Image (cartoon, rainbow, N blue to C red):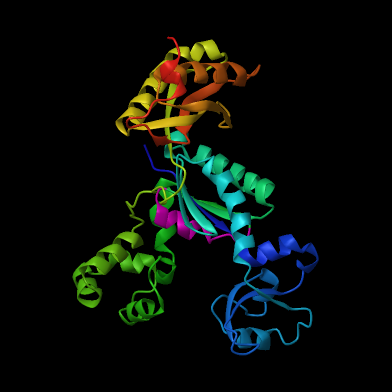
C-alpha cells in the first residue's frame, strides 16, 4: 500500500489572523513584526500578507527595510505579535485536521502533517478528497485558508504544499514523484540553505535532477556522509521518515478494512465490524490503555468519508462495550442510498488502565 501523506500549511498565518480579527485591513499591506523595543523600527518581520509581499516584504527582513519598501503604501500596517490569539485560531484549525488523519503530527503553530494511508488504502484520489475536505473544514472552523501538499512521503508533501499558495492543493502521486522532484531547484529541498545551494552550484548542481545524478563520493567529500546521503535521497524523492504523533497530542487507535462488497445496510457489515473491534481492543490492551471516545468511519463508494462518534460515561477497554457502541453508531449512521466501501473503528481519549477499574467492570455481563 502506498503511503499518503498530507502537509498542511496555514497561509501567511499571523497576518491572516490579523485580517480575520479586523476584516477592513485585508486589502492593505499587513506586516506582523517582532519588535525588539530598542527603537520604534528595531526588530524583524515575522509574517507579511500577500499585499505587502508585492512590495518585497518577507519574513526575516528588518522592520526598517520593510518600512522603506512600503514607503509609497501610506495605508501599510505594522503590528506586534499576539501569540495567544494566534494559538487560539491554530487550535481550531488543527482540531479539524486531526479528525481527518490516521496519524497527526503538529510541527508548528501554522503547519502539520497528516498520514491518511489507512483510511485511503493508499488511494490518491481519496487522499485528494480528504485534502479538499480539510481545507473546507479549516475554513469553517477557524475562518482561515490553508495550502495542502499530498505525496507519498513527508518531504515531498512539504514541498508540494508550497507550490500553489495561497489556498492551494498540489497532489504528487507515487508514479510522478521522480519527475516532480527532478525539475526543482536544489534549494527547494528542505535543509538545503543558501550556503549549500551556492556550493552545489559551484559543482554544477542546480536542480534536484542534477543532484540525483551527481557522484555520491564527491558529495560525501564535500558535505559528509550523512548530509550527502540525505540530499541525494531527497533529490530522488526518497524519504522514509514516518508521520509521528507530537508529544502531548491526543492519540488514537484505529483500524480500517476494505469490504469484499459495497454495503448498503449496517447489517451487511456486522461481521467485519466485530473483527475490527477485536483488533482495536487488542491494541488498546497491549498498551494498557482505556478509551472514552469511540468512533466509526465509513468511506463510501464515491470516496466521501462519513464519521460518527460517541463519548462513553467512563473509560474502558472492554471489547463488549466497544462492539455494542460501534454497532449502535453504525446503525444510526447508515442512510438510505449510502454504499460503503471501507469500514473503520477509532478509539481515543485515553488514560492508563494499569491497576484501574472503571464503572464497566462492575456492570453485569
Q: Is 6 left, or right, of 282 in this rendering?
A: right
Foreground residue among 281 and 185: 281
Expressed as whole percent of the image width and height from the top left, the position of residue 328 reads 55, 16
Q: How many marks?
A: 0
Q: Nearer the viewer, residue 361 or 21?
A: 361
* Residue at the image position 34 percent from the left and 54 percent from the top: 239
**Residue ranking furthest to the right:** 24
Q: Residue at x 64, y 87 (%)?
A: 41
Q: Is residue 16 left or right of residue 104?
A: right
- Residue sitting at x 65%, y 55%: 145
User: Is residue 360 found left or right of 16 in the rendered image?
Assistant: left
Any part of residue 296 in sight: no
Quarter of the image where one finds residue 236: bottom left
- Bounds of the magenta span? 152-166
The image shows residue 347 at horizontal and vertical percentages of 46, 31
For this rendering, which residue is in front, 279 or 218? Answer: 279
Quadrant in the picture for the N terminus: top left
Q: Is residue 30 left or right of residue 133?
A: right
Is residue 220 inside the magenta stretch? no
> Does any portion of residue 136 appear in the rendered image?
yes
Give percent across and percent down for residue 227: 27, 68
Is residue 254 placed above or below 247 in the rendered structure? above
Residue 161 is covered by the magenta coloring? yes
Quadrant of the image containing the C terminus: top left
Residue 76 in percent (x, y) is at 74, 78
Q: Residue at x 55, y 40 (%)?
A: 130
- Quadrant of residue 71 in the image? bottom right
Amino acid at each position: 500500500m502506498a503511503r499518503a501523506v498530507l502537509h498542511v500549511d496555514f497561509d501567511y498565518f499571523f497576518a491572516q489572523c490579523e485580517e480575520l480579527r479586523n476584516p477592513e485591513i485585508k486589502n492593505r499591506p499587513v506586516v506582523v513584526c517582532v519588535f525588539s523595543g530598542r527603537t520604534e523600527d528595531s526588530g524583524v518581520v515575522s509574517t507579511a500578507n500577500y499585499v505587502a509581499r508585492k512590495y518585497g516584504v518577507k519574513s526575516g527582513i528588518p522592520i526598517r527595510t520593510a518600512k522603506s519598501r512600503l514607503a509609497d503604501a501610506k495605508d501599510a500596517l505594522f503590528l506586534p505579535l499576539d501569540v495567544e490569539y494566534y494559538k487560539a485560531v491554530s487550535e481550531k484549525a488543527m482540531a479539524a485536521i486531526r479528525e481527518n488523519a490516521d496519524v497527526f503530527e503538529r510541527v508548528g503553530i501554522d503547519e502539520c502533517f497528516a498520514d491518511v494511508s489507512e483510511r485511503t488504502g493508499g488511494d490518491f484520489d481519496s487522499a485528494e478528497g480528504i485534502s479538499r475536505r480539510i481545507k473546507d473544514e479549516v475554513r469553517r472552523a477557524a475562518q482561515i485558508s490553508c495550502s495542502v501538499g499530498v505525496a507519498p512521503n513527508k518531504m515531498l508533501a512539504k514541498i508540494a504544499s508550497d507550490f500553489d499558495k495561497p489556498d492551494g492543493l498540489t497532489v504528487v502521486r507515487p508514479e510522478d514523484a521522480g519527475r516532480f522532484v527532478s525539475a526543482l531547484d536544489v534549494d527547494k529541498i528542505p535543509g538545503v540553505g543558501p550556503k549549500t545551494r551556492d556550493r552545489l552550484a559551484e559543482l554544477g548542481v542546480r536542480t534536484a535532477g542534477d543532484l540525483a545524478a551527481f557522484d555520491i563520493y564527491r558529495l560525501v567529500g564535500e558535505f559528509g556522509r550523512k548530509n550527502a546521503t540525505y540530499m541525494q535521497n531527497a533529490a530522488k524523492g526518497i524519504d522514509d521518515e514516518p508521520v509521528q504523533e507530537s508529544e502531548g497530542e491526543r492519540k488514537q487507535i484505529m483500524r480500517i478494512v476494505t469490504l469484499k462488497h459495497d454495503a448498503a445496510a449496517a447489517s451487511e457489515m456486522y461481521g467485519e465490524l466485530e473483527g475490527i473491534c477485536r483488533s482495536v481492543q487488542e491494541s488498546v490492551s497491549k498498551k494498557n490503555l482505556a478509551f472514552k471516545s469511540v468512533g466509526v468511519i465509513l468511506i463510501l463508494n464515491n470516496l466521501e468519508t462519513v464519521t460518527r462518534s460517541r463519548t462513553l460515561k467512563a473509560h474502558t477497554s472492554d471489547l463488549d462495550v466497544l462492539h455494542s457502541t460501534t454497532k449502535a453508531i453504525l446503525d444510526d449512521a447508515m442512510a438510505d442510498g449510502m454504499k460503503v466501501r471501507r469500514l473503520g473503528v477509532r478509539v481515543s481519549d485515553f488514560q492508563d488502565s494499569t491497576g484501574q477499574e472503571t464503572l464497566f467492570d462492575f456492570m453485569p455481563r
